Structure formats: structure tokens, C-alpha cells
């Protein structure tokens, strides 16, 4: 069974920023939100929306690993 993932409201803005910098960006369905790469550097990024209250921005146990 699959579930729809909630997407932070600022995800598209962040993806656009990285792409304008020339990075390859993959929106993932994993413990993190984005896989960003450029040259030999790969970053796994968890996006949080700063407009949400702090209690809603906490990392899940899976994201903390």
C-alpha cells in the first residue's frame, strides 16, 4: 500500500534555486526530500517549511538517521 507524501510549500522554490545553480535535482520518495548533485558532490536534503510552527518542522525518526 502506498500513501501520498506531504510536500513542503517551499519545495518548488528550493528545487528551482538548485537548478538555476546548474545542479541535477531529484525529488525523492525516501527518508529525505531531494538528492542534489553537481560535479562529484551529492547532497541528500530534507526540506522544512519555515512558515510552519516548530512542532511541525521536527525531523521524523527515519529522517534523523
Image (spheres, grey):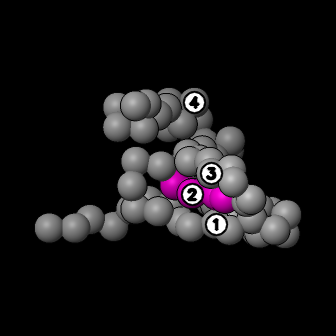
Closer to viewer: mark 1 or mark 3: 3
Density class for disc 1 (Cα within 10 Å; few <14, some 14-19, many ≥20) is some
- Mark count: 4
Q: Which residues are drawn in magenta?
A: 33-37
Residue at 56% from the left image edge and 57% from the top image edge: 34
Disc sitting over residue 42 in the figure: 3
Residue bearing mark 4: 54
Residue bearing mark 1: 25
In contact (CB < 8 Å): disc 1 and disc 2: yes
Q: CA distance from mark 4 to mark 1?
A: 27 Å
In contact (CB < 8 Å): disc 1 and disc 3: no
Q: CA distance from mark 2 to mark 4?
A: 24 Å
Q: Earlier in the sequence, mark 2 or mark 3?
A: 2
Q: Earlier in the sequence, mark 4 or mark 1?
A: 1
Residue bearing mark 2: 35
Density class for disc 3 (Cα within 10 Å; few <14, some 14-19, many ≥20) is few
Q: Earlier in the sequence, mark 4 or mark 3?
A: 3
In percent of width and height, residue 7 lies at: 51, 60
Q: CA distance from mark 1 to mark 3?
A: 10 Å
Amino acid at each position: 500500500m502506498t500513501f501520498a507524501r506531504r510536500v513542503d510549500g517551499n519545495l518548488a522554490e528550493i528545487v528551482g534555486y538548485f537548478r538555476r545553480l546548474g545542479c541535477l535535482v531529484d525529488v525523492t520518495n525516501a527518508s529525505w526530500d531531494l538528492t542534489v548533485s553537481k560535479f562529484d558532490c551529492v547532497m541528500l536534503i530534507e526540506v522544512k517549511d519555515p512558515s510552519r510552527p516548530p512542532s511541525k518542522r521536527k525531523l521524523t525518526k527515519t529522517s534523523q538517521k
